[in-house]
Image (cartoon, rainbow, N blue to C red):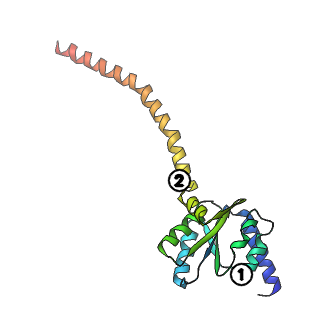
Amino acid sequence: MDRAEKREFVTELNETFKASGAIVVARYAGLTVAQMNDLRSKMRAQGGTVKVAKNRLAQIALQGTDAETIQGLFQGQTLIAYSTDPIAAPKVANDFAKGNDKLVILGGAMGTTALDAEGVKALAALPSLDELRGKLVGMIQTPATRIAGVVAAPAAQLARVFAAYAKKDEAA
């Protein structure tokens, strides 16, 4: 890379860091190309991205962002996983690390909060935004269906009473 390409890469990475909901930094020494491609495809499916960048360029790109405090994590062979959804990148990285011990999560950031490896794992345990939205809609709909059932119950009971009287009159 020449200087102009590096400058462009740092600018692009800086904008990405500013727009990201969560950033995960992990050590990937020993991963094969196939495993790395598998990680990238899983991350892409969840709306995230995995990049391998030179540590110095990543540290420069972090300057001026909320995640500036994680610059110390960039030592050795590191990769960056990020997504706009604050749960997606940590969840995919954590799930992949469970199945492959060559990927070691070092830490990350969510907004201005720096996370250690345990923080990233705790974040990965939370439900995603889509799951939370589904639960919220379910919680909103449940009382509405209960109210509809309660309102409809007296009418149904009256209909059953009238039907019983009608049968009694027919029998007599």
Q: Residue 166 at x, y = what percent?
A: 25, 17
138 left or right of 1 in image: left
As helix, strand or loop, the secondary structure at mark 2 comes to helix
Rendered image: mark on residue 109: none
Residue type at tag 1: Lys
Residue type at tag 2: Glu
99 shown above or below 153: below
2 left or right of 102 in image: right
Which residue is the site of mark 2?
131
Rendered image: mark on residue 54: 1
Q: Quadrant of the C terminus?
A: top left
CA gap, disc 1 and disc 2 = 35 Å
Q: Residues within 10 Å of mark 2 (few under 14, many from 20)?
A: few
Between label 1 and label 2, give the one nearer the viewer: 1
Q: Quadrant of residue 155?
A: top left
As helix, strand or loop, the secondary structure at mark 1 comes to loop
Residue at the extreme bottom: 2
Picture residue at 73% right of the left edge, 59% below the top: 112
Q: Quadrant of the N terminus?
A: bottom right
Confirm whether residue 73 shows in the render.
yes
Q: Residue 142 at x, y = what percent?
A: 47, 38
